[in-house]
Image (tube, rainbow, N blue to C red):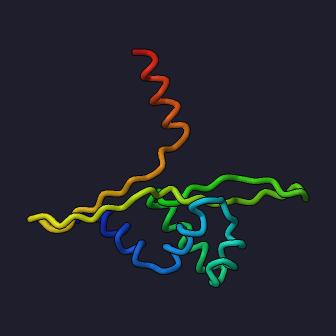
Amino acid sequence: MSDDATVVFDLLDDEYARDILAETYEEPMSAEALADACDASPSTIYRRIERLRDQRLLADDQRLDPDGNHYKVYTANLQRVTVELTADGFELDVDREEDPADRFTRLYEGFKR
């Protein structure tokens, strides 16, 4: 298994990371809302958020609250993880949501051809 696959595998073994992904699957949530939903401290949630973002399993978006303050909300970027046992060991295939900017670029490039 590659180093990146090992990191993802280890991350998905973490209960808080799995809870964050499950909670943000249908609707974006702030770190504060995630701390409440996951029954975890904000520092625990922020550490997991950073690890999930590093692996592109979680995306963020900036929001503006009624007071004019900015805050981030997070959305699961993971669609599917497949683990396969091969003669060489385990292979991990991670399907992520496509970044809207990348999707637009891909579509635009397709039109140019």
Residue under the image location 65 percent in, 73 percent down: 34
- In-image side of 48 versus 109 (left or right): right
Quarter of the image with the N terminus is bottom left
Residue under the image location 59 percent in, 80 percent down: 44
Residue under the image location 70 percent in, 65 percent down: 30
- 55 or 113: which is nearer to us? 113
- In-image side of 87 versus 85 (left or right): left
Q: Residue furthest top?
A: 113
Quarter of the image with the C terminus is top left
- In-image side of 29 versus 68 (left or right): left
State the image coordinates of residue 37 (x, y, percent, origin top left): 66, 77
Picture quadrant of residue 43 = bottom right
Residue 27 vertical placement versus 99 (above, below): below
State the image coordinates of residue 4 (x, y, percent, origin top left): 33, 62
State the image coordinates of residue 25 (x, y, percent, origin top left): 56, 61
Residue 22 vertical placement versus 95 (above, below): below
Picture quadrant of residue 2 = bottom left
State the image coordinates of residue 45 (x, y, percent, origin top left): 60, 75
